DNA sequence: TGACAATATGCGCATATGCGCATATAAAGC
DNA sequence: GCTTTATATGCGCATATGCGCATATTGTCA
């Protein structure tokens, strides 16, 4: 039982990445394909500082990939499973929160597999 | 995009429950069936205070159910999806962490659907 | 080289979180 | 009623986390 600790620690960190509204927004922004930091900033409404920091954290956890091109940095979801995870939970929660308003339509973005738009 | 905030907030809280090693241990202890606080204490090695508090938090988030019987309180996983979620992520992480040691065998408990041993 | 654009980071603050300790509450048995 | 057992909770502490601000870093272009 004790030797499972590293697993639980790592998994906790993994879930911890998703335990933040701003990071979920970022995931939501990235799940349709890679975006630059600025694009994510515009889409999420968060500040550049925070988006950058959150993306760095997500990258440290292996949740997103990083691709530099000139002055810009493109981030993308590293693991499609992550998006799937978010999608399923978000959909379920969205349904729970709002039984009749068609809020779920907004979550459609989480539905398709993330397209890797490589350059 | 702004009206999705409540969804992201709730989902973040949901993931937040799983973003803690001790709580994952508790999930692991409960996923085979309901247990009393003391049983969870023994199985996880955490203190009674913390187990109680974590269980309370998990109950507040609707992750576990509570059943009182005399002086004892039985907790159980409320949502099988939660166990499934933990199982898949834990298995994947376990494999990542430890490519060859058979650590995964310990994770088997997460595999079967949680048995509801109602009284 | 110098100005500009895109991204990252150090610092400080406010708040959240997990924990241990002691203690409160609740139920059972004498 | 008193003691014992099982669980919950108030308090304080140490640390973690998210944020804003200013600034550093890196690359582009003139």
Image (spheres, coloured by chain):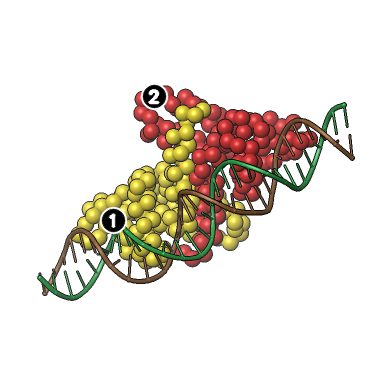
Chain colours: A yellow, B red, C green, D brown
Number of the label disc, if any, that sits on residue B99: none
Circle 2 — which element?
loop
Q: Is residue A78 above or below residue B28?
A: below
Q: Is residue B106 above or below residue B14?
A: above
Q: Is residue A44 above or below residue B32?
A: below
Residue A29 rendering spot, x and y as whole percentages = 39, 58
Circle 1 — which element?
strand
Front in this rendered view, residue C23 or B80: C23
Residue A103 visible to an observer of this rendering: no
Residue B33 rendering spot, x and y as whole percentages = 63, 31
Residue A63 visible to an observer of this rendering: yes
The residue sitting at 55% across, 40% down in the picture is B23
D11 relative to C15 in the view: left or right: right
Front in this rendered view, residue A92 or B77: B77
Residue D17 rendering spot, x and y as whole percentages = 46, 53
- Tell me if mark 2 has few (under 14), some (14-19) or many (20+) residues whose alpha carbon lies within 10 angstroms of its own: few
User: On the image, numbered disc 1 is attached to which residue?
Assistant: A74
User: On the image, numbered disc 2 is attached to which residue?
Assistant: B101
The residue sitting at 25% across, 60% down in the picture is A72
Badge 2 sits on which subunit?
B
- Tell me if mark 1 has few (under 14), some (14-19) or many (20+) residues whose alpha carbon lies within 10 angstroms of its own: many
Front in this rendered view, residue B79 or C1: C1
The residue sitting at 38% across, 33% down in the picture is B97
Badge 1 sits on which subunit?
A
């Amino acid at each position: 039982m004790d030797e499972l600790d590293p697993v639980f620690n790592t998994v906790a960190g993994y879930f911890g990445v998703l335990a933040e509204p701003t990071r979920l927004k970022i995931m939501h922004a990235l799940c349709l394909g890679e975006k630059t930091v600025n694009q994510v900033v515009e889409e999420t409404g968060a500040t550049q500082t925070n988006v950058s920091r959150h993306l760095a954290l997500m990258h440290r956890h292996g949740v997103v990939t990083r691709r530099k091109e000139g002055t810009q940095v493109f981030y993308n979801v590293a693991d499609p499973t992550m998006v799937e995870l978010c999608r399923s939970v978000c959909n379920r929660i969205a349904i729970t929160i709002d039984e009749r308003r068609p809020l779920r339509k907004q979550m459609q973005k989480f539905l398709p597999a993330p397209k890797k738009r490589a350059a």
